[in-house]
Amino acid sequence: MSVSLRASLVHAAMEQFTVDRGELVVGGERLSLLAARVGQTPFYAYDRSLLRERVASLRAALPKGIKLHYAMKANPMPAVVSFMAGLVDGIDVASGGELKVALDAGADAAEISFAGPGKRDPELRQAVASRVLVNLESPREVDVLAAASADFGVAARVAVRVNPDFELKGSGMKMGGGPKQFGVDVEQMPQLMASIRHAGLAFEGFHLFAGSQNLRAESICEAQLKSYELALRLAEYTSMPVRFLNLGGGFGVPYFPGEQRLDLAPIGDNLQRLLQRARSEMPEVAFVIELGRYMVAEAGVYVTRVVDRKISRGQVYLVTDGGLNHHLSAAGNFGQVVRKNYPVTIGNRQGGQATEIASVVGPLCTPLDLLADRMQLPVAAIGDLAVVFQSGAYGASASPQAFLGHASCPEVLV
């Protein structure tokens, strides 16, 4: 096997967690002690020091004029949202339930935005009463918000989520360009802006989100530039100043072999140039970058205990007490077309122990319950702790925890 091909089969180093006495350290605690502290396996653990470091690295790389918002759909655990609310400038929610969590966490309502293609009427009324910014995604929402504004005597704060006429190249999930359930098509904007004016809503700006999970800085820069220039064009349809411009996020993290971490430096430079342009072209605008996965994914681990070790026709299977019911993404059933392994290890057998090719499977009665497929892992025994890295985003809340009647999975912030 050539060197380049071999390198393409290797995960990016998971160096965010240290090792002590052969065990991963999460939140300052050795893994076996953390498991005892939680009181059961499986569980998710999120390291608050890593969350703090990630936000600090973003602040250092991006211009000071950029507001950072946490998209809490990535990890809506109340303790995480409360912690993040103290680090970032705002919170983005995608349901009335998330809005309640954000408000309970102490987030400033003036810096909460609410997006989603199917907001129910009670959720829209909840948003108006809470005085948060609603990202409009349909003409229907204008009428509901106008009625709520009249009832409450409060003008609904709105931005328009625009479905752009371009896509974010290289993104894992494309959320703009072509026909989409998200946002309002660019060609429908003149009519929608007229409706907003007629309804007397408090227009603040635009939300453009072209895609997510992108590891190519040049693609993100291109999408940000196009989004900014589209906002300039759309500003012609309103007599009100644009004071809010959410350029989305799209920042990816490395999950699979061959992927490398995103270089923030070109993105920071690009945003600085856009800020300089905006001083004359949209002087009242505040730029927002909305990130979920990038802020929390690498700070989290999923920990599950080996309950059986089986060899079937020469292949080693480590059977664990948790699987796709808790971590649908790692099992490959949350958007992967061809299943690829997340970075996985045996968390209490670090530091030079013998390795073997093994598969990590969960306890469910389905062949889809696969956390690691024939990976090079430290030799494990019953009772050891298998760890799935990059698990701080789209884990517990994005998984079918009631499937087959197994117990739900606790989460801890440490």
Image (cartoon, helix red, strand yellow):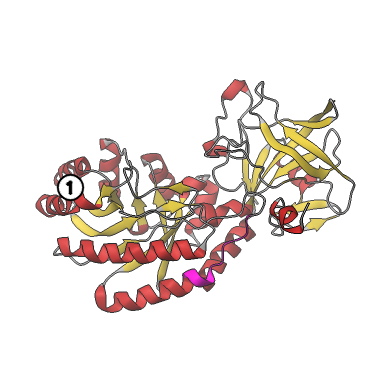
Q: Give the answer, above or below, for where 25 lies relative to 404.
A: below
The correct choice, above or below, for 125 with respect to 287 in the image is above
Residue 59's spot in the image, x, y percent?
51, 70
List x then y, in percent, for residue 369.
66, 29
Confirm whether the magenta stretch covers residue 265: yes
Where residue 339 sits, quadrant-wise, is: top right
User: Residue 7 location, x and y as percent?
Assistant: 72, 56
Residue type, label 1: Ser
At a point 52% along the width and 67% down the height, the residue shown is 58
| Count of numbered circles on the image | 1
Tell whether 406 sits left or right of 114.
right
Q: Main secondary structure of the magenta part?
A: loop
**What's the residue at 81%, 51% (across, down)?**
23
Q: Please name whichever residue, 382 or 370, is drawn nearer the observer in this view of the structure.
A: 370
Secondary structure of residue under mark 1: helix
Highlighted range, magenta: 259-267
Q: Which residue is drawn at the image coordinates 33% and 43% (left, top)?
A: 180
Residue of label 1? 149
